[in-house]
Image (cartoon, rainbow, N blue to C red):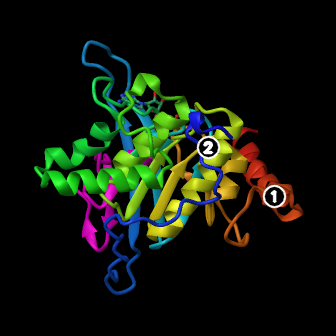
Amino acid sequence: MSRQDGLSTAAAPPPVAVEPMQQAAASPAGGAWLAAEQIERQYDAPSANDAPPTRALASTSLRVDAGEFVCVVGPSGCGKTTLLRILGGLLRPTRGQVIFKGKLLTGPQQEIGYVFQHANLMPWRTVLRNVALPLELQHRPAEEIQARAQAVLKLVGLQGFEHSYPRQLSGGMAQRAALARTLVHAPELLLLDEPFGALDAITRERMNLELLGIRQAYACTAIMVTHSISEAVFLADRVLVMSQRPGRIVAQIAVPLPSPRTLELMGAADFASLTSEVRRAIDRQQA
Ligand SMILES: Nc1ncnc2c1ncn2[C@@H]1O[C@H](COP(=O)(O)OP(=O)(O)O)[C@@H](O)[C@H]1O
Ligand SMILES: [Mg+2]
């Protein structure tokens, strides 16, 4: 793989000196680390329009333990992004609540990082300055900003591209930069909304491997929306399947595959039977 693609050939990037991810605080008695309790969401139609509101998410509950990697799959438009935005505190549920580390989630948190489907880098800033931006906004000392931004860029395999502009990056490299911008806060919870959906299959597999490495190095918890069943099974400890809109979780499939995972695993019989199980759960929704 050429360096120009910004792809490292290592299965997982080595840990580097970014601020260590804090281990999850113990949640209150019997409580989950992250819990959504009967959350619902509807979107009002624009005021000039008499159309009824859109019910995006039906009553949905879920629990995620610290350190888990959970993937969410479901038909297009079923409310996956809506669910993820609510879990990230970016959108309020119309009903229900989210409890994060024992507290009611009422807005965005620094411990929660969000990676969007599109990199949305600022074209006039270099890669380094895009990644540094969240820390600049917090008025952190210049040396700290530089050190942390450089460290996460190394972690995502963008060393050597610090001074490139977004227009000079491939799609995979832009998503790496977006991931670095989120990781610069060392989030405890990483939410990813189809982050690799626009990438070619080979780059995507490489990104999946590196994402597992990052998660392992920093012991973070991750929830990722994807439309790829094999990606979900490859990455996750648990796959949640959503129904058609208004979405709700209709199945959860545990993925007891060994770690660390390698791409060869995708050829194994266990892998095939798990992907079939997820596919059947999705098909039942569409029948
Ligand atoms: N801001 C919004 N205003 C109105 N309707 C929305 C808004 N965001 C999403 N929706 C609608 O809610 C439904 C679920 O959307 P979304 O959560 O983006 O689904 P998914 O991510 O599964 O494709 C869709 O019908 C979509 O059109
Ligand atoms: Mg979406």
For the residue labelled by badge 2, is the local secondary structure a helix, a strand or a loop?
loop
Pick the front one: 222 or 104: 222
- In terms of secondary structure, where does tag 1 sit? helix
Residue 242 seen anywhere in this rendered image of the structure = no
Marks 1 and 2, how far apart at CA: 26 Å
Residue that appears at 39% across and 73% down? 33
Q: Nearer the viewer, residue 70 or 103?
A: 70
- Quadrant containing the N terminus is top right
Label located before the other in sequence (1 or 2): 2
Residue topped by disc 2: 74
Mark 2 is surrounded, within 10 Å at the Cα level, by few (under 14), some (14 to 19) or many (20 or more) other residues, namely: many
Residue at point 37%, 39% (across, down): 162
Per the image, the residue denoted by label 1 is 264
Above or below 164: residue 190? below
Of residues 168 and 137, the one nearer the viewer is 168
Is disc 2's CB within 8 Å of ligand 1? yes
* Quadrant of picture, ligand 1: top left
Looking at the rendering, the stretch of residues picked out in magenta corresponds to 83-112
Question: Callout 1, which amino acid?
Answer: Glu
